Image (cartoon, helix red, strand yellow):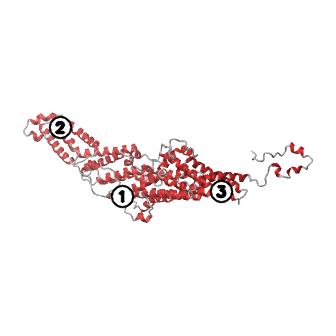
């Protein structure tokens, strides 16, 4: 549209050519005033900046904190959101007009005036930016921001500043329904201000405010989570009990820090500085680096200072698990190139923890192999070594996935050292067993071999077999009730159950065979009274001797105990009952018959049913039911 004052300009009008046809063609341009031009009329860029200054100056000066008390104590964004929107638009328009006008006249007084207004506006926006960040800490806490992150579409819509018509929010007297909604609005305000200041050349001032306030929040959050920046020497001088408490704090801290603190800060930073990738990176790195480095350097210092003892392995495993589980988040949150040092520190801690865990596991294996106590379990019960070792191995099995990663490069046990009778893991070159399964089977095999050696300490061979049956039964029960069941497989369990039956059968044969052999193979066959007396006397003596010896035996597992009693009773009671019923009348007619028949079949049954409970000592049921402990006994240190 032509500007006002130029409407009379008609370059090709016939009217001009006919009325002055005798004049030269150039004479029509001899005076610019003929066409409405004035030598002093402002250029288009001047008109634009004049109009922009005319509109912007009242708005900007109204909110100059140095001119009025109202502007000094009132927040523009809280007082009137529509006016805040207009203020931002005025600043954008002023910046565009300054740029446009400077291309024609870089020394214009109007540029000086515009620049002065721009400085006032930036001072106002700095104040607003600071107030929003500091006053709304509760709405900008990382947890609230993390919740907001799931509502990206809402953030996007509000970032356009269309919030003043929403009747469900509280902004300057309006109502709001959710705390997160207000957090979204606050984040959008920050983004508007940041984009305005950055585009106007005031990025440095904007970032300084943001970094100071948000870094203090991150540092405070890390401190409240109990994370300290500890050096290698500081950790080394601490007692293990103190380190253990700090590890517990760290395990809680890393979970909260990754899910809430750093995640929330990254979301906020990405939103506020969405328009500039370089600024986003610089800002978030400076805010988070110190806290993240303090968080992820602690596990490395613990790993390097631990004495690789087996009882400390579980804390190392907990820390390794925490970093491994949060690794995708670490890569996503600290993805900038300038944050590679954070990723590197987390990875270094992971590697050092893995090395320490590997060494501690080897120490446990060595301690198990070197265990040489001469103590035996009373009554052939469960040996303390079995309880301690299995409880420890069960706890290790809970970390099987982590241990599988750690031990992936470790060489498996030599196959030549694995007796198939005890091992039972399906492993071949064509179908190799998982390395972690081989490792656990190897540890249990070492335990079984140690138990085999301890069984030789019993002078009574039958008791040695009962000891083996008891301890293998304990191992099987523990395996079946834990993650070991899936690591070792049904074939392994079946083979060990077969060994238990074999040991139980050997116990019966050696402990009760003389009782069984004291009875005739044909209990109802005809025989002389004297022969009958001898058989009764022989049975009495054998049964009393066997019962006296076996009454001290312990079988803690109820299933194995019942199976043994039923098996022994089936071999003795039917034969003795038939012999007793056949010759009872013959013996009772004679004098002193009560010295001949001392046990009725019912008596024998009662005596057998009372077997294998034994005295409640170490190795009995009360000891067997102990819960797994992360503290390894001294015998395995």
Q: Would residue 566 be visible to someone looking at this image?
A: yes
Placement of the N terminus among the 4 image quadrants: top right
Residue 290 spot, x, y in % from top left: 49, 60
> Disc 3 marks which residue?
114
Horizontal side, residue 335 vs residue 472: left or right? right
Residue at the (34%, 44%) spot, across then down: 497
> Disc 2 marks which residue?
602
Q: Would residue 363 be visible to someone looking at this image?
A: no
Callout 2: helix, strand or loop?
helix
Residue 447 spot, x, y in % from top left: 35, 53
Q: Residues within 10 Å of mark 3 (few under 14, many from 20)?
A: many
Q: Nearer the viewer, mark 2 or mark 3?
A: 3
Q: Residues within 10 Å of mark 1 (few under 14, many from 20)?
A: some
> Disc 1 marks which residue?
367
Q: CA distance from mark 2 to mark 3?
A: 115 Å
Q: CA distance from mark 2 to mark 1?
A: 50 Å
Q: Earlier in the sequence, mark 2 or mark 3?
A: 3
Asked if marks 2 and 3 touch (Cβ < 8 Å), the reply is no
Residue at the (13%, 35%) spot, across then down: 584
Q: Earlier in the sequence, mark 1 or mark 3?
A: 3
Give the total of numbered labels.
3
Residue 66 spot, x, y in % from top left: 56, 58
Q: Nearer the viewer, mark 1 or mark 3?
A: 3
Asked if marks 2 and 1 touch (Cβ < 8 Å), the reply is no
């Amino acid at each position: 549209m032509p500007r006002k004052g130029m409407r009379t300009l008609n370059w090709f009008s016939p009217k001009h050519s006919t009325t002055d046809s005798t004049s030269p063609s150039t004479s029509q341009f001899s005076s610019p005033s003929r066409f409405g031009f004035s030598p002093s009329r402002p250029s288009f860029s001047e008109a634009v900046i004049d109009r922009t200054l005319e509109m912007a100056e009242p708005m900007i000066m109204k909110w100059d904190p140095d001119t009025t008390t109202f502007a000094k104590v009132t927040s523009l964004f809280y007082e009137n959101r529509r006016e805040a929107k207009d203020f931002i638009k005025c600043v954008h328009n002023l910046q565009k007009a300054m740029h446009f006008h400077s291309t024609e006249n870089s020394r214009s007084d109007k540029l000086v005036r515009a620049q002065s207004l721009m400085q006032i506006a930036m001072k106002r926006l700095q104040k607003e930016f600071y107030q929003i960040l500091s006053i709304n800490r509760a709405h900008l806490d990382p947890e609230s921001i993390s919740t907001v992150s799931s509502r990206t579409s809402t953030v996007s819509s509000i970032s356009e500043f269309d919030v003043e018509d929403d009747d469900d929010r509280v902004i300057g007297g309006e109502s709001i329904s959710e705390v997160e909604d207000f957090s979204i609005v606050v984040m959008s305000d920050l983004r508007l201000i940041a984009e305005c200041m950055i585009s106007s050349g005031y990025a440095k001032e904007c970032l300084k405010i943001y970094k100071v306030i948000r870094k203090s929040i991150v540092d405070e959050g890390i401190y409240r989570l109990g994370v300290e920046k500890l050096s290698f020497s500081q950790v080394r001088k601490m007692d293990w009990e103190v380190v253990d408490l700090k590890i517990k704090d760290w395990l809680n801290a890393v979970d909260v820090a990754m899910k809430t603190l750093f995640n929330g800060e990254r979301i906020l930073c990405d939103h506020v500085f969405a328009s500039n990738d370089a600024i986003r990176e610089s800002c978030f790195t400076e805010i988070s680096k110190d806290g993240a480095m303090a968080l992820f350097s602690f596990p490395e210092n613990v790993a390097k200072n631990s004495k690789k003892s087996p009882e400390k392995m579980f804390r190392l495993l907990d820390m390794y698990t925490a970093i491994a589980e949060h690794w995708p988040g670490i890569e996503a949150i600290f993805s900038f190139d300038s944050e590679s040092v954070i990723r590197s520190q987390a990875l270094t801690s992971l590697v050092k923890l893995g090395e320490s865990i590997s060494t501690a596991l080897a120490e446990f294996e060595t301690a198990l192999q070197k265990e040489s106590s001469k103590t035996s379990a009373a009554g052939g019960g469960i040996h303390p070594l079995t309880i301690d070792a299995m409880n420890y191995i069960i706890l290790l099995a809970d970390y099987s996935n982590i241990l599988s990663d750690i031990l992936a490069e470790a060489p498996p046990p030599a196959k030549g050292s694995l007796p198939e009778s005890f091992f039972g893991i399906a492993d071949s070159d064509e179908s190799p067993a998982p390395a972690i399964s081989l490792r656990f089977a190897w540890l249990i095999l070492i335990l079984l071999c140690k138990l085999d050696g301890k069984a030789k300490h019993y002078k009574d061979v039958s008791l040695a077999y009962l000891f083996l049956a008891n301890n293998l039964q304990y191992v099987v029960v523990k395996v079946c009730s834990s993650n070991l069941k899936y690591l070792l497989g049904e074939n392994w369990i079946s083979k060990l159950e077969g060994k238990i039956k074999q040991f139980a059968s050997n116990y019966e044969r050696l402990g009760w065979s003389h009782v069984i052999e004291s009875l005739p193979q044909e209990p109802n066959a005809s025989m002389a009274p004297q022969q009958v007396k001898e058989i009764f006397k022989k049975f009495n003596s054998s049964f009393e001797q066997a019962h006296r010896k076996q009454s001290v035996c312990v079988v803690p597992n109820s299933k194995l105990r019942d199976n043994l009693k039923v098996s022994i009773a089936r071999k003795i009671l039917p034969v003795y009952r038939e012999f007793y019923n056949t010759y009872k009348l013959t013996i009772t007619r004679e004098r002193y018959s009560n010295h001949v028949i001392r046990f009725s079949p019912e008596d024998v049954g009662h005596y057998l049913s009372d077997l294998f409970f034994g005295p409640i000592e170490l190795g009995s049921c009360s000891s067997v039911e102990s819960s797994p402990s992360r503290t390894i006994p001294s015998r395995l240190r």
